[in-house]
Amino acid sequence: MSKAMLRRADAQTIAISFTLNGRHQELAVEPNELLLDLVRERLGLTGAKRSCDVEVCGACTLLVDGRPVSACTTLAFEVRGRSVMTIEGLADNGKLHPLQEAFIEHGGFQCGFCTPGMILAAKALLDENPNPTEDELKHFMHGNICRCTGYKKIIESIMAAAKVMREKRA
Amino acid sequence: MLRPFRLEEPETVKEVSELLGRFGETAKVYAGGTELLLAMKEGLVHYERLVNVKNVKGLNDVTLDDSMMRIGALCTHHQLETSPLLQQKLAALVRLEQNVANVRVRQVGTLGGNLCFAEPHADPGILLLALGATMVAQRANSKREIPAEQFFVDAYETCVEADEVLTEIQVPVPVRNSGVSYLKFGYLERPSVGVAVALQVRDDGTSILDTRIAVGCAGPAPKRVREAEEQLSGKSLDEATKNVSKAGEIAGRAAQAISDLHGSQEYKEHIVGVLLKRAFQNALSQYRAVQR
């Protein structure tokens, strides 16, 4: 059954405007529409993944006003007036973000399924704490699950990116 | 999938209460949604209307009023874990909040929502019981203060009425000569046992003036265990330290632990005892650290 057929004639719609990866968006959502479905199905940005669907795994992590949320359990209307970043918006004019560079350089992924969430969560961490200890990093990132790497390479990647980002700022 | 519902967006507590009164069991308060939306997605519950309370102003502040900390029910876990005022006056609550679920849940989940949803595997209610907190619930034209001990009724059940809104959590700031500790044990993000101890030592430093002990997660709802407290209150520090095992046994039985995938009843009762002993030592160490 198509999405349109599922919509009820009397369905409430909410007009929202927000910023998505730096671009202004205006659209109408239904109250029960989830942010993950909006981004993946309607806007075609499939970097964020649906996996556990219960806010535990972090594969659907998006940044809302720079902070990580589980898009699988966020109502779409909640982003009105706010700024949303998906992994597709992280590179700057085709130039990869230091975190993306570091994940490639240090082999911070294998299958890649968790990687968009990992990198966005790591961005939120480094924006808040540019020089985290390994313990602080582990505490912040423990809600992002990877079933391939054993985390060592991910931690190395984020620590390496942190160093590059600090040097850029200096 | 989330079945369709209507969204209401009132801007005052009065409007929220009136909506809840009008629509009764077909409507539910929606704040952070970190627990409610999961239950709705699973189809475990369905509401025709969600009443978004996040547009109500004045419910997300942390203020200190004499020696009473007033925490707005809409404060997110993230707000609480980063509050300088709480760090200074209620460090045990900050430590608890730093370890609620994960960074994404802390970002949007609210303290009020956590308490009202009353999921048994939740941390805050246990510590709030030991701290002697009071929950403030409001209707359109009335307001009542509910001691934490009366707030929790059963799994997923509080004494908040259908048309009441939890607006504030009041926590007396621990007085001098005191120590507070909350410890939990669990697999991944879900606490299977939580124990809180708050104690106050007599001015002369010889004995325990007062203790409050609360347990949770193991059974249906967090609860204060007065019988365990009696093993410690009024006792010399040495005697209390000896009695803490006994207090742990009592608290373990009082926890109404259930056997499930997180462990057997006996196992959880044992863990209550272990955590109580450690929490007592932590609280005592805090007291001693201030004395030096």
Image (spheres, coloured by chain):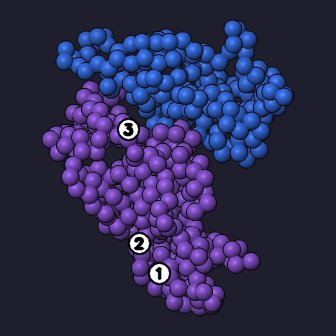
Tell me, yes or no, whether the two marked residues, 3 and 2, touch with CB atoms within 8 Å: no
Regarding mark 1 in the picture, which secondary structure is present there? Answer: helix
Identify residue type, mark 1: Glu
Tell me, yes or no, whether the two marked residues, 1 and 2, touch with CB atoms within 8 Å: yes
Give the answer, above or below, for where B230 lies relative to B156.
below
Q: Which residue is mark 3?
A: B54
Q: Residue at x 52, y 16 (%)?
A: A20
Of circles 3 and 2, the one toward us is 3
Numbered badge on residue A79: none
Which chain does the residue under circle 2 lie in?
A: B
Question: Outermost residue, front direction?
Answer: B66
Q: Quadrant of the C terminus of chain A?
A: top right
Give the answer, above or below, for where B270 lies relative to A28.
below
Q: Quadrant of residue B122?
A: bottom left
Tell me, yes or no, whether the two marked residues, 3 and 1, touch with CB atoms within 8 Å: no
Q: Quadrant of the N terminus of chain A?
A: top left
Regarding mark 2 in the picture, which secondary structure is present there? Answer: strand
Q: Which residue is mark 1?
A: B229
Identify residue type, mark 3: Lys
> For this view, does B82 lie left or right of residue B134?
right
